Amino acid sequence: MGKQTLTNPRGAVGSSARMDSCRQYLQTYMILRRGGGREHSGRMQQCCQELEEVNQECRCEALRQMMQRMEGRYEGEQQMEETVRRAQRLPSMCEMEPQYCQIRQRGY
């Protein structure tokens, strides 16, 4: 399946770009961070592969939509802020453009 585009009838986040691996990576990151564990590089690699499937112009929107689906799943404002900051830097961490995505909390 090709890269997803904003002109896709299903939107920027179609079936292959639901960002499930990235969502799981961020959730695992926060759980491990709370417990003092280390990152799971396999999940990060899966997230990068998933992000690569999304057209560059659509990556930030895909991440914003993913974060909207994750809203309310964290214990407290600080944990959500940390997760948003991590999500904003995912393209950079995966060595992709754009390097940074602007994602706001509550309302995105």
Image (cartoon, grey):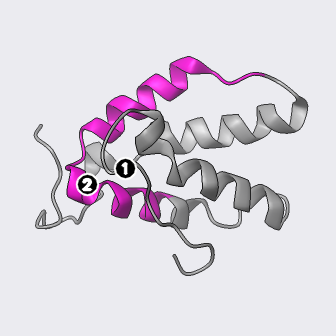
Residue 24, above or below 59: above
Q: Residue at x 23, y 66 (%)?
A: 11
Q: 98 or 80, which lies in front?
A: 98
Q: Is residue 61 left or right of residue 38?
A: left
x%, y% of residue 18? 37, 50
Residue 38 occupies which quadrant of the picture?
top right
Can the viewer see residue 55? yes
Q: Residues within 10 Å of mark 2 (few under 14, many from 20)?
A: some
Q: Which mark is residue 18?
A: 1
Disc 2 marks a residue whose amino acid type is Gly
Can the viewer see residue 20? no
Residue 7, above or below 44: below
Q: Residue at x 81, y 67 (%)?
A: 77
Residue beneath label 2, please? Answer: 14
Disc 1 marks a residue whose amino acid type is Arg
Residue 92 occupies which quadrant of the picture?
top left
- The boundaries of the magenta stretch are 38-66
